[in-house]
Amino acid sequence: MSAETKRPHSGRSREVDPVPVAPLRLIRNCFEFAPQAELEKVPAGTRGLYVLYNGYASHRGADKGRRYFDVVYVGIAGLGVRSGVRVRLRAHRRRMGGEWTHFSVFEVHENIRPEEI
């Protein structure tokens, strides 16, 4: 047996289930700096945080052409029955579609309670 499957406990070794450990406690997956046109790629019912950005290219000196993103809005979704991130992004596109160009989604693990988000 390898060291990963055995742990000392009160002087004895015992088997441990090989459950993978998530690298981050809260964030399961992310989709960053996606253009507004790609919001349909967000899976239905996704729970977590999302950020809306206004992206623009610099027209000055050494940074000419470089992309910058100003944060326009930060939201939480997936706490209710019909409130996944994609539903919220669609609503923002209808109400304030001209104010943001890109978005990021940070999906949380299933075992994260709404209070923790």
Image: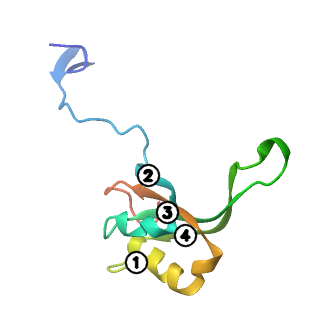
In terms of secondary structure, where does tag 1 sit? helix
Dot 4 amino acid type: Gly
- In the rendered structure, the answer to whether residue 9 lies left or right of residue 33 reads left
Residue 9's image quarter? top left
Q: Which residue is mark 2?
A: 30
Question: Residue 10, relative to residue 86: is it above or below?
Answer: above
Percent of width and height locating residue 102:
56, 64
106 and 41: which one is in front?
41
Question: Residue 14, position in %: x, y?
Answer: 16, 22
Task: Determine if residue 86 is in view.
Answer: yes
Label 1 Cα neighbours within 10 Å, binned few <14 / some 14-19 / many ≥20 = some
Relative to residue 91, is residue 41 drawn left or right?
A: left
* Contact between labelled residues 1 and 3, with CB atoms less than 8 Å apart: no
Q: How far is disc 3 from disc 4 in space, using C-alphas?
A: 6 Å
Vertical order, 72 against 98 (above or below): above
The relative height of residue 15 versus residue 66 in the rendered view (above or below) is above
Name the residue tied to disc 1: 87
Name which residue type carries label 1.
Val
* Nearest-to-viewer mark from 4 and 2: 2
What's the residue at 84%, 51% (across, down)? 60
Disc 4 residue crowd, few under 14, some 14–19, many 20+, Cα 10 Å? few
As drawn, the label of residue 49 is 3
Of pointers 3 and 4, the one earlier in the residue sequence:
3
Q: Which residue is labeled 4 in the image?
A: 75
Camera-nearest residue between 2 and 41:
41
Marked residue nearer the N-terminal end (1 or 4): 4
Spatial CA distance of label 2 from label 3 is 10 Å
Circle 3: is it few (<14), some (14-19), or many (20+) Cα within 10 Å?
A: some
Mark closest to the chain's N terminus, 3 or 1: 3
SS label for mark 4: strand
Q: Secondary structure at mark 3?
A: strand
